[in-house]
Image: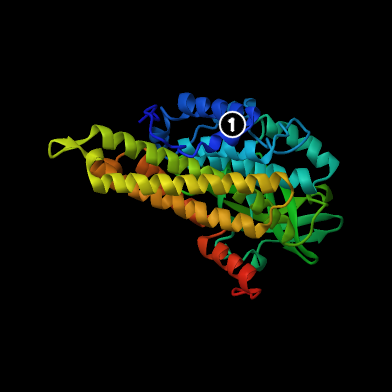
Amino acid sequence: MPRTTDPAPTDLLRIDDELTDEERLVRDTVRRFADDRVMPNVADWFEAGTLPKDLVPEVGKLGLLGMHLQGYGCAGMGAIAYGVACRELEAADSGLRSLVSVQGSLAMFPIWKYGSDEQKEEWLPRMAAGEAIGCFGLTEPDHGSDPSSMKTHAKRNGVDWVLTGSKMWITNGSIADIAVVWAATDNGIRGFLVPRGVRGFTARNIHKKLSLRASVTSELYFDDVKLPAGAVLPGVQGLKGPLSCLSEARYGILWGVTGAARTCFEAAAQYARSREQFGQQIGGFQLTQRKLAWMLADLQRAQLLALHLGRLKEAGKITPEQVSLGKMSNVRTAIDVAREARTVLGANGITLEYPVIRHANNLESVLTYEGTEEIHTLALGQAITGISAYR
């Protein structure tokens, strides 16, 4: 179902009035792209379990890939503009936002921040244009929330490296031209750039997903992959590298999920005005109005939190704990809104003719990736008490 133009008060508090002209231009440009290019097709993509690869250069032409990075063909825009773009992308589908945030925050960001000049020049301009796709290899089959226990390792072979192991649940994995892979070494965890086609590196898609179906999710395998000395990211060592990338991605998520929630609310509000039972529109029933009112209140709180964290990020004041709060709270809010919206639509809410069940299913994955709700809860618990509950 196309996004409604019905005048549901999705921004009752006029939060978007706080955006600059440039940020509103980003909003309108990305929303137009999503409405014209994605929304008419995304239910079919979701049902088929695919996302067309030719979307990547289209998104690149809009300047959305690595848009918050400076130089190397990147747009160099602010954190709020990036957040707004994530919101409008995820209003269409979480898989589309995942593609963009993995490319920019998990693949391009570590090269931009920790890479050598040669690595930046080789990869970033092509990735910004959508001519090369990246992925981020951290999670393993047996190690998700505890990356410090990873089994993937890299050993020196003279001046070069030999990489062995596997990664799991990797967005863009099988279509990536370059994988940023984190591996244990004798001197701590290091990041490696592993190009497609190198001997011993294979990727296999994960099938039978019931969530994030309009997204490529893969397993990566490294069977004694020989890498030159120049494959390692020189600027970081230890978990600081991958965790800093995850913080960038989580920031995009806490904005993005407000778009998914907004679409679900809009669908429920429109349906409540058109669906009739007992001789009247269901939007006239008190229980339905209560659902809509609380969905709107929750949505507006999530949007305000995203905007505030965006301002902190642009001021250089944001902390990982603040990002954890935003990711944890806003994803939970979005799931609650999606589920409540589904009840307004009744049986129609479980079909792909409406966007609600697709968003609800997608958000189950978003709840887990880039740090589970439990991990973010414990991160906040440690910030409150000074006591780590999981180390």
Judging from the image, the colouring scheme is: rainbow
10 Å neighbourhood of mark 1: few (<14), some, or many (≥20)?
many
Residue shown at the point (48%, 25%) measured from the top left: 37
The number of numbered discs placed on residues in the rendered structure image is 1
Q: Give residue 314's position: percent from left, percent from top.
A: 71, 44
Q: Nearer the viewer, residue 45 or 298?
A: 298
Q: Is residue 319 above or below residue 40?
A: below
Residue shown at the point (34%, 44%) measured from the top left: 292
Q: Secondary structure at mark 1?
A: helix
Please state, as top left, top right, bottom left or bottom right, where the C terminus lies in the image: bottom right
Q: Give residue 146's position: percent from left, percent from top.
A: 61, 66
Q: Amino acid at mark 1?
A: Val
- Horizontal relation, residue 34 to residue 191: left or right: left
Q: Give residue 211's position: percent from left, percent from top.
A: 42, 48
- Horizontal relation, residue 284 to residue 179: left or right: left
Q: Is residue 81 above or below residue 258?
A: above
Please state, as top left, top right, bottom left or bottom right, where the N terminus lies in the image: top left
**Residue assigned mark 1:** 56
The quadrant where residue 58 appears: top right
Let me know if residue 201 appears in the view. Answer: no
Let me know if residue 281 appears in the view. Answer: yes
Q: Residue furthest front?
A: 13
- Horizontal relation, residue 96 to residue 270: left or right: right
Q: Give residue 171's position: percent from left, percent from top.
A: 56, 46
Residue shown at the point (45%, 52%) measured from the top left: 333
Q: Residue furthest right?
A: 159
